[in-house]
Amino acid sequence: MNRAEFIPKLHWTQNSRHAKYDQSPSKKEAAKNIHDWNCYQEDKVENGTKRVSPCYYLHKTNMAFAARTGQQLSRVTEQFIAIPRAIANPDGTPYKSVKSSTTTVLAKRYLSATVSSIAEVPIPKVVILEGMFMIYTPPVASMSTFKDYTNFLAKRWLLPHFRVSSTHEVHVVFDHPGRCGVTPKAIEQCRRDEHNQTGPEMTTELQQITDETLLPKKWHQFLGNRRQKRLLVNYLSGSLLKVGRDIIVYHHQKVITAGGFDGSQQDHAYSLSWTDGPVIQHEHRLDSSHEEGDSRVWYHACHSQSPVMIFSPDTDCYHIGLPFLEIYPDLTVTIQLRSHFIDSRFLLLNVMHEALQNDPDLADIPRNKLVSVLQVTLIASGCDYVSYFSGLGKASFLNTLFQYSAFICGAVSSDGIIGCITDDSIKTSLVSFYRLVGCTYFRKHRSAFHSSSPHTLFKQIWNESLSSEQNHIRWLANIRDTIWDKVDFEDEVIPSADALRLHWLRCQWVRSLWCQAYQQFPELPSVQDHGWNIENAKVSVVWDTPQNLAAINERVELLTKGCKCKTGCKTNRCRCYKKKQFCGPGCHCVQCGNLGHSCRNVTR
């Protein structure tokens, strides 16, 4: 029998959930090596029909070969590509999604924590504005120079706060890209640069910005160039201090800027105050080396008078600061999520902190770890440094935590439920992360399981002779096996345990960065020890271990390459026999005598 008959041709229709087998595929559909398969990874839409990804095709090829030959499939969830598609794009960059769903879930759950009227907000003594959002306010048509734009920003964002006599300080903080050297944020910056490329219509680059420099005609294209954006930040950091004399209403008030200075002043913060006249001075207490504005915001908040109001639409901002309310119990913080004349939204962070502590669904988590558990869950589900999970939004992970918090963050028990995702030990925090991911996939594909809960499933497969980590890996594999036949594309399947471990190391790096936001000069852990690689000053993600990558190459070769013997495959003229391997689905031999008991490569 010709082995080409074993390889099915896969047809996909929009209305059918599962593929059907037919005759062997054409040569164009059969890739010759793993590189070809990776080139096809991105899902495409043709005439309203989503094409089947090659990984799914290879999996069905393997299953069809086993069915036709009667050989048993040892594992139905083998990986066929070098990147985990659930957390990576086809080109090997981290998968990205939206953050805002988190705020929606929390706002619906804790109604008293969000308000829409400033009258319901504690009157702040200090207002901190994240300047990287301010600059996306486009200039109006009547403005011609950057001086006009600075006056506009000052009146739009700063003056309303200075009109309140209780306001003592208004801070404007900016990002300082590259301050901490090469960091994983460079991957996200490169992605944004590619997204902002505008071809020949790109605005002419400015070499410097002064008061009389003319404004660019296309503002968002101008901001899309990171060098131009940095020039604007440098200019605004100084010019906002100059115009402060015109917007300060009371003598006890100050304008403070930070993050926008370079050279010997790169870590400095400066203020403008008014006594007998305008005075610009160095604010030593607010000097810091934070690269990200959302971290610098919290350094300023923790070292300022309370109450504090922070303007930042970025969801990451208030998750960074939640644990600091326990370090600084007298700190009262309000987050302004939206600032529109007819649509404002405020998050009362202290009220949310108290609501979390009293949430009955989170009662099994120790109170001293609760807000950190929420923070780490949000990091693990995706942020600027870490991949998101395809098909699983941040809201999915958050709702899973609320539903299975006792199982995810349980104490030591006889069935291996150990550790919490906030533990310092990588072993105990890793298995807790495995439970978080497994529960999220279980919850999404609930109808595919016979077990009533992920904890019940875990008890059923628990093996006393194996370690806790090995049992968790078996549990993840069981979930992966179950959902394979319920999904259509490989980006809906749980990544391998090794890929998840590397993802968790990246999460630990981000957590270390966020936990130091209240410190003046944070010390970042090694990037290369946390799931990234640096080569030629460029950061790339390490998606899997070398052992797994080698196994994937062998697996793809088994399904796409093979012998074409016509003499029975029992001599060294057969490439499979010579390698001491059984012939597989990739072979096109005739009257084969080299069949084993498995469709995988097996050493005799």
Image (cartoon, grey):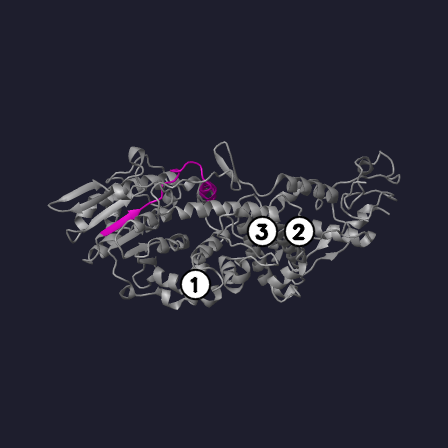
Q: Which label sits on residue 86?
A: 3
Dot in front, 2 or 3: 2
- Name the residue located 46 percent from the left edge and 57 percent from the top edge: 374
**Residues marked 1 and 2 touching at CB (< 8 Å):** no
Q: Amino acid at mark 2?
A: Leu
Magenta stretch: residue 594 in it? no
Place residue 33 in its image quadrant. Answer: top right
Left/right of residue 211 with respect to residue 580 in the rendered view: left
Q: Which residues lie in the magenta part?
A: 169-191
- Name the residue located 50 percent from the left edge and 45 percent from the top edge: 506
- Give whichever of 58, 123 is nearer the camera: 123
Q: Position of residue 105 (x, y in %)?
A: 45, 63
Left/right of residue 601 with respect to residue 54 in the rendered view: right
Place residue 591 in its image quadrant. Answer: top right
> Alpha carbon of mark 1 to alpha carbon of mark 3: how far?
25 Å
User: Can you identify the residue that label 2 sits on?
Assistant: 466
Label located before the other in sequence (1 or 2): 1
Dot in front, 1 or 3: 1
Left/right of residue 285 with respect to residue 444 in the rendered view: left
Q: Position of residue 554 (x, y in %)?
A: 71, 41
